Amino acid sequence: MRDSSARYDDVAQRAAAVVIGRYSTSFGAASRLLAPPLRRHVRNIYALVRVADEAVDGVGAGHGLDDAAVLAALDELEAQTEAALRSGYSANVVVHAFAVTARRTGIGPELTRPFFASMRTDAQRSEHDPTSFDAYVHGSAEVVGQMCLRAFFDGAPVQPVELSVLDAGARRLGAAFQKVNFLRDVGADVQTLGRRYFPGVDPAQLTETEKRRLVADIDADLAAARAVIGRLPSGARAAVLAAHDLFAELNARLRRTPAADLLTTRVSVPTGRKARIVAGAVLGARRGGRGWA
């Protein structure tokens, strides 16, 4: 029985690895720098997040689901997740892989519930005010950063004061990633999905002033996150620094791209530049230490 359980855990986690391999480039490249146990945890988290996100980003509709059916699918996925958090098992291999990580690292419903709430928002709301925007970013990105943070400790105890400091950095990094994606995908979001995320910003009339304000806000998030990377476990530092630096490069390219062009151009980082950033992050993590800035 024990051998069967271990085999099922392994199969589920291999399935989660396929998800990140097919869907992610920057995040996937950074995750390869994690120590192997941490890499498995992050892949398990990413797979559940991606499956839920895809449901509301068109895959559900592509299979004939209306908004009500998409919401029902999310409800079912959340119910499966909470059941697996309690029991450690799910017949859904992506959920099972997530539960393996969550139960070992201390991820609970206090993080999964805000995430699923934000996913439902995409099926219910096409524009945001400041309050709903902050709630959406918290659930869709900040708590994912907190999940990954817990994965980096692989079940080891963390002092509450230290966890609070690191949680703040994890939330800011998650928020930066989400806002970069909103800005680089502003054209597709409004034209394909009919969504306008940034409060008070009309993507069709995005001005240079608005773009600079958004880029500066992202820079502030990135700076706050960068200040605590050196306090992470050594097996996670290079990967988190690489992810941070890749998105910092994306933000710099967004700054240089005319606002009007963002409606028709998706900014990206060339492969060669990505490789140099990742190499630099590996070197930086080796040189860095606790509390670097």
Image (cartoon, rainbow, N blue to C red):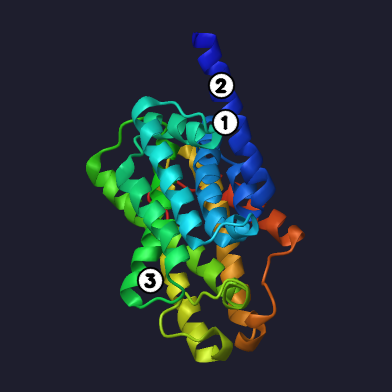
Circle 1: residue type: Gln
Neighbour class for label 2 at 10 Å: few (<14), some, many (≥20)?
A: some
Tell me if mark 1 has few (under 14), some (14-19) or many (20+) residues whose alpha carbon lies within 10 angstroms of its own.
many
Could you tell which of marks 1 and 3 lies nearer the N-terminus? 1
Reading the image, the residue beneath label 1 is 13
Circles 1 and 2, Cβ within 8 Å, touching? The answer is no
Identify the residue under disc 2: 8
Q: Position of residue 247 (x, y in %)?
A: 57, 63
- Give the mark nearest the N terminus, 2 or 3: 2
User: In 3D space, how far apart are the residues under numbered discs 2 and 3 (Cα atoms)?
Assistant: 39 Å
What residue is at 75 percent from the left and 58 percent from the top? Answer: 271
Image disc number at residue 133 = 3
In the shown orientation, is residue 161 left or right of residue 192?
A: left
Mark 1 vs mark 3, CA separation in Å: 33 Å
Residue 138: horizontal and vertical position, in percent? 37, 60
Q: Is residue 11 left or right of residue 89?
A: right
The image position of residue 199, as x and y in percent, is: 41, 80
* Horizontal arrangement in the rendering, residue 155 relative to residue 238 (left or right): left
Q: Note whether 27 is above or below 109 in the view shown.
A: below
Secondary structure at numbered mark 2: helix
Looking at the rendered structure, the secondary structure element under dot 3 is helix
Q: Please tell me which residue lies in front, 187 or 234.
A: 187
- Between 279 and 146, the residue placed more toward the observer is 146
Q: How crowded is mark 3: few (under 14 residues within 10 Å), some or many (20 or more)?
A: some
Query: In x, y percent, where is residue 283?
Result: 60, 48
Q: What's the residue type where badge 2 is placed?
A: Tyr
